[in-house]
Amino acid sequence: MAIEKTLILIKPDGISRKLSGLTIDRLDHAGFEMIGAKVVSVSDELAHKHYIELKDEPFFEPLMKFIQGGFHNNYKNKVLALVYQGENAIEEIRKTVGATNPEEADPTTIRGSFGRVATKGHYENVVHASGNAKDAARELALWFKPEELLD
Ligand code: UDP
Ligand code: MG
């Protein structure tokens, strides 16, 4: 197993519903080191680049609106971007985050505890976490400059 870095985003639903603190508490107790953190305004370009691999999915359009705060515009288009580092961090953090569909996520996970399926059908699942090493490397380069990571 290797020391890995993984990208977490507290999505606009999490920011709007004041879930940042609870979410960070769960992530901290997963046992990894926080090495980067910042509030980011999500442009249309950043949203598209981040989710480029999902561009042909039927939920892509609402996903673009959701990640840019379009369903939670009382808090504009802000997300909290975090980087955690540690052994096997990508897979272990995904376990803490839980399944994509919050209705199916284990209730002990972040998504199972705090997520919901919106009445419009898209998932408001509070957090993004990199899915694998390739995605993590691509996403980290997209969201953070190397000098912003204190590893
Ligand atoms: N998503 C959605 N409906 C779906 C599948 C995905 O709204 O049926 C959204 C949800 O916000 C999810 C994101 O699209 O977190 C990215 O989907 P992915 O399959 O990569 O899931 P994740 O890696 O976030 O678990
Ligand atoms: Mg994914």
Image (cartoon, grey):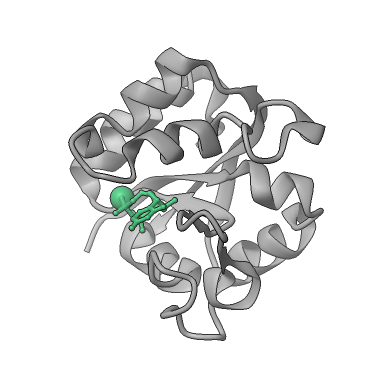
Residue 1 place in picture, x, y as percent: 22, 64
Residue 151 appears left or right of 61 = right
Q: Is residue 56 left or right of residue 3?
A: left
Residue 12 placement: quadrant:
top right
Q: Residue furthest front?
A: 120
Q: Position of residue 123 (x, y in %)?
A: 48, 58
Q: Residue at x 47, y 16 (%)?
A: 44
Left/right of residue 3 with respect to residue 98 in the rendered view:
left
Quadrant of the image occupied by residue 68: top right
Q: Residue at x 59, y 44 (%)?
A: 11
Q: Position of residue 35 (x, y in %)?
A: 57, 40
Residue under the image location 78 percent in, 57 percent down: 21
| Extreme residue toward the bottom, this view | 107
Q: How many numbered marks appear?
A: 0
Reply above or below: 64 against 141: below
148 or 121, nearer to the observer: 121
| Residue 24 vertical placement versus 11 (above, below) | below
Q: Residue at x 68, y 52 (%)?
A: 14
**Residue 3, percent across and down?**
32, 53
Q: Give the answer, above or below, for where 8 lies relative to 52.
A: below
**For residue 115, side relative to residue 78 (left or right):** left
Q: Which picture quadrant has residue 15?
A: top right
